[in-house]
Image: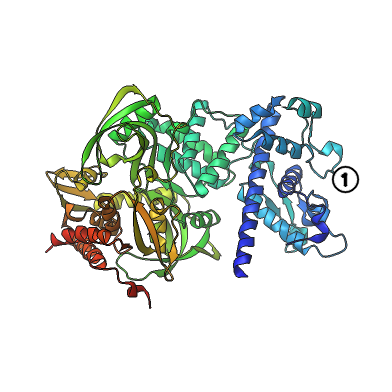
Amino acid sequence: MTDKSGAALRVPVEERLFSLVLALLATETGLTKHEILSTVQGYRQRYNNSGDNANLERQFERDKDDIRELGVPLETIDDPSQSGNNQNLRYRIPRGSYELPTDITFSAEETTLLNLAAMVWREGSLSDESRRALLKLRSLGLQADQPVLSYAARNRVRESTFEPLNTALERNSTVSFSYLKPGEAHARKRTADPHALIQHQGRWHLYAMQDGVPKTFLLRRITSPVTQTGKTFSPPPGDQAEVALRELEALWNSRSATVQVVPGSDAATRLLKRRGTEADGSTLTLHYADANILADELTGYGPEVLVVAPPELREAVRERLEQTTDQHIGDHREEAHRG
Amino acid sequence: MAERRKADRTAATRGSRQAADKLAFLLALVPYLMDHDRVSVSEVAKHFGVSEAEIREAVNLIAVSGIPGSTGTYQHNDLFDVAWDDFLDNDQIVLTNLVAIDESPRFSGREAAALIAGLQYLSALPENTDRSAIATLMAKLSRGASAAPTQLAVEDTATDATLAIIRECVAAGVQVEFNYRGSRGDTEQRRVDPLRIESLDADWYVRGWCHLREAVRTFRLDRISDPRRTDEPITHHSQDVALPDALFEGSLGDLEVTLELSSSALPLLEDYIRDNPVTLLGESRVRTVISVSHLHGLKRLVTGMPGVVTVVQPQEARDAVADWAAAGAAQYR
């Protein structure tokens, strides 16, 4: 990491990045890597005129990634007469793709709404990205018409797989991960092209193409880190998130369960408020998209809920209750986890 | 050794993220300063919500930055400049020479997607019923992005009457009254200064100052019945009471329970685990301690994550879970 010759002349990273953006915005025809490394502030101080600049070139590659990450459209132009020779590649930031079109403006009400929208995300990448988007709104001189801090609605993304999947989605990268399918004892490795990330009934789902078949994965059931395979794919046209949401919604509407609840119990109060629930005395009809999620939820109510139908759900809840009983009867068995 | 390398890499990632944040700030600040012929450091700091020191640091950097220019040597005319006397003596910013930047930057595809998904989430809320205004705003965000927004969407949930009343009270700054059914099964009338509405997974919560308990409390919306708006202004404001980040902190009890669970389930319990140590037992199994106020809540929590969480001790906690699950199972015999 340490570059002794350059240590005394070190320019702060943000100054180097800022200088690079300015230089690439100012050029119409683009700059070659040589021009950049030998003249741009932060590189030129470390540029070796006669020798090896491999470290500096790697630095430039990382800087390009960091800048693109911010949404700056850094472009590479190949010289058609010398295609393939990467010393002749030229780099630029085309003004039209960089600058916010001047006809896009936001009213004070819209700014308030966008501030609220940004505050929805409490933590993680969505929160960072929202914060940067707000910074750009402030750049335009926009202020919300009312303070929003006190009455923000907030939502959390708790699944650690969300961020790597969102990155893969942006880059159209094929991913692989282990997935524990409901009803199976062990997780299996899956490789799929991510098309959308959607939140349905508060849970995040990945909509992806696996071996040519569209599949919906629940993020919570991904049991390994998500890795990019290195392959990319061309994204299908159209609003994939919308398609995925519609499919889940159709599933939710088509599946229903009948349960009996103990009147006045916590189960009765809460299940009645579940979206789409219909009540006939203490018999409730519930909608769901995933029988295993509903089974987990209903198991938590213990004796307050009795599942009547469908039989698979009844069986799933009974099994869960018995398993939980078995795991908690008597003393905790230390030896179970020794081997 | 590997640990050390990993630590170095993490530090490098953090460093590059900070630099990227600073770059984003510089690219946003310059167009703002261009639009304001003369503006005070304090006003800019207030507008961007950062410290005055950060503004001065940024202006100092902008003032020496520029482009290599035709000579490749950063001549004076190729650099930004500020009116130094105004800046150093009066804390006023006046840019006197401009380079390369004309307008504010576009949103990145991911930034636009994050705001669009946030808007979709908000559109579920009662006061945001103007769907066409929200749709117009989403279209503007897409058009103002440097790449197509990533495919993110949040389900448009049906509005809930309880949510509507509480949102009204939060916005008006008045107390709300409701009947609340605790997880013990008891129902009490509560009067609350509602401060914030939050959701976690499919569940909605209101957080605020509870006049009955005289403390900050979190209430599940689905346990609230008969909510009524009052005319009484709230007595505790969000700037006076610290709302902890963890949802249940204010109502956590001192009953400590040791659990074993699969490590992938840790995020689901993070509000209960907080800073308690987590010990690795095997490849994917961990042991930790959570604090709860009573066994009634615990038995529901553990039973609702079947096969994932096991109570280790105390024995009374194991018994409570076993009895609850067994009573449920008995219905099926």
* Residue A293 found in image quarter: bottom left
Q: Relative to B136, does residue A255 appear above or below in the rendering?
A: below
Q: Position of residue A283 (x, y in %)?
A: 14, 48
Q: Relative to A43, does residue B30 appear above or below in the rendering?
A: above
Q: Which of these two is toward me, A36 or B205?
A: B205
Q: Which of these two is toward me, B248 or A201?
A: B248
Q: Mark 1 falls within which chain?
A: B
- The residue positioned 48% from the left and 52% from the top of the image is A237
Q: Which of these two is toward me, B129 or A172?
A: B129
Render colour scheme? rainbow
- The residue positioned 77% from the left and 56% from the top of the image is A33
Q: Position of residue A18 (x, y in %)?
A: 72, 45
* Residue B59 found in image quarter: top right
What residue did someone put label 1 on?
Answer: B71
Residue A215: in sight, yes or no?
Answer: no
Q: Residues within 10 Å of mark 1 (few under 14, many from 20)?
A: few
Quadrant of the drawing holding the N terminus of chain A? bottom right
